[in-house]
Amino acid sequence: MRLVLDGGALVSNWRALDRLSGDASAGAAVKADGYGLGAAEVARRLAAAGCRDFFVAHWGEAQALTGLVDPARLAVLHGIAPGEEAAATAGLAVPVLNSAEQIARWREAGGGRCHVMVDTGMSRLGLNWREDVAGLCAGLDIDLCMSHLASAEEDTAQNAAQLARFEQARQQVAARRYSFANSAGIALGTGYHFDCTRPGLALYGGVPCDELADHICPVMRIETRILQVRHVRAGDSVGYGATFVAQHDMRTATLALGYADGFKRALSSIGAFRNGDARLPILGRVSMDLTCIDLSAAPALGEGDWIAADFVLPEVQAATGISQYEWLTQIGRRFDRIWVD
């Protein structure tokens, strides 16, 4: 099995998002191992293209990028938990301080340059916008003051409400730069861009909102081998639970791919593979390591041949109800990742 990853498309997506960010510079969220594609390879390509700001969740993720990006422009979004003070002061990256306790922990550890997250309505991480944000941040050497949109991909009044609260926080927190917009937030317009945007999903070929659809290229292609070709007779069932029963004699293939690889059971009987223009439907249930498809439209394919999944992130989200974020980040470790630039 292999993921064929298009480095040119990745860079093209970042450049498009950087351009759409106007006067702001586009950074890159490379947490969750570059959304499953490989953070080191993603960061290396984006840094070479001109990206300067990178965002990870954990200190271990920051350590994995040592030597690839400027540690002063690498942010750890989860901040500093008890016991992480040594990592936070080692110069691997810059912590994003999310609470009064984290701020106190940072000061006690010797402090230095940091980022601050202000919660403007997501009720997740960050200083509550209703609190004395100015008092909590007084004396800190803050590079980025940031917040996070909860519903950027939706037409909702929550976006404007969060923006107003972030503008309020901006008046209270003295920082070199301010950051608010994720991928979909970029499409909300210049008022949401500030100094630095933080795209994630759209870098990797996901399309969080219609406004970005014409700007984003697919990055990932799933390919696997045909393990066996079978001639199934009318009345034979395929796979667990006999959810598919052949209505006529047909030629099928068993593929080396299953839900243990992140190719989810939700695609059972509705997903497909491609051979040129021919669509080859999945037959029955996707199992742990195997998937069966109809080969009727591809008579030349045989055992050992490679075949690509018909897998476009917005389309599989629409078909299954599973978010593009989950599809990307849960791609399995058994794939060879092959970058094509």
Image: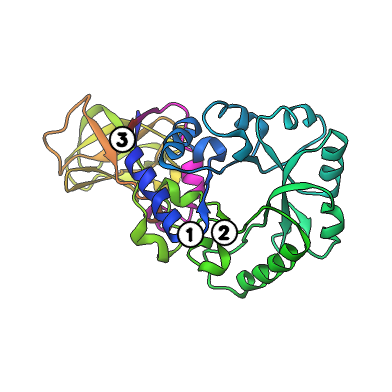
Q: Which residues are magenta?
A: 315-338
In front of the other: label 1 or label 3?
Answer: 1
Which quadrant would residue 72 be assigned to in this image? top right
Give the residue pinned by disc 3: 341
Give the residue pinned by disc 2: 181
Residue at point 67%, 57% (across, down): 147
| Residue sitting nearer the eye, 208 or 224 | 208
Neighbor class of circle 2 (other Cα within 10 Å; few <14, some 14-19, many 20+) is many
Q: Residue furthest bottom?
A: 157
| Residue sitting nearer the eye, 90 or 310 | 90
Residue 21 got which mark?
1
Q: Quadrant of the C terminus?
A: top left
| Disc 1/disc 3 C-alpha distance (Å) | 25 Å
| Disc 1/disc 2 C-alpha distance (Å) | 9 Å
Q: Is residue 124 visible?
A: no
What amino acid is found at the position of numbered circle 2 in the picture? Answer: Ala
Q: Contact, CB < 8 Å: mark 1 with mark 2? A: yes
Q: On the rendered structure, is 242 left or right of 106?
A: left
Q: Is residue 318 magenta?
A: yes
Of the two numbered discs 2 and 3 on the same chain, state the one appearing first in sequence: 2
What amino acid is found at the position of numbered circle 3 in the picture? Answer: Asp
Residue at point 73%, 28% (across, down): 87
Residue 76: x, y in percent?
66, 39
Total residue callouts: 3
Q: Residue furthest left?
A: 300
What amino acid is found at the position of numbered circle 1 in the picture? Answer: Ser
Residue 188: x, y in percent?
51, 68
Q: Contact, CB < 8 Å: mark 1 with mark 3? A: no
Q: On the rendered structure, is 47 left or right of 149?
A: left
Q: On the rendered structure, is 330 left or right of 294?
A: right
Of the two numbered discs 1 and 3 on the same chain, state the one appearing first in sequence: 1
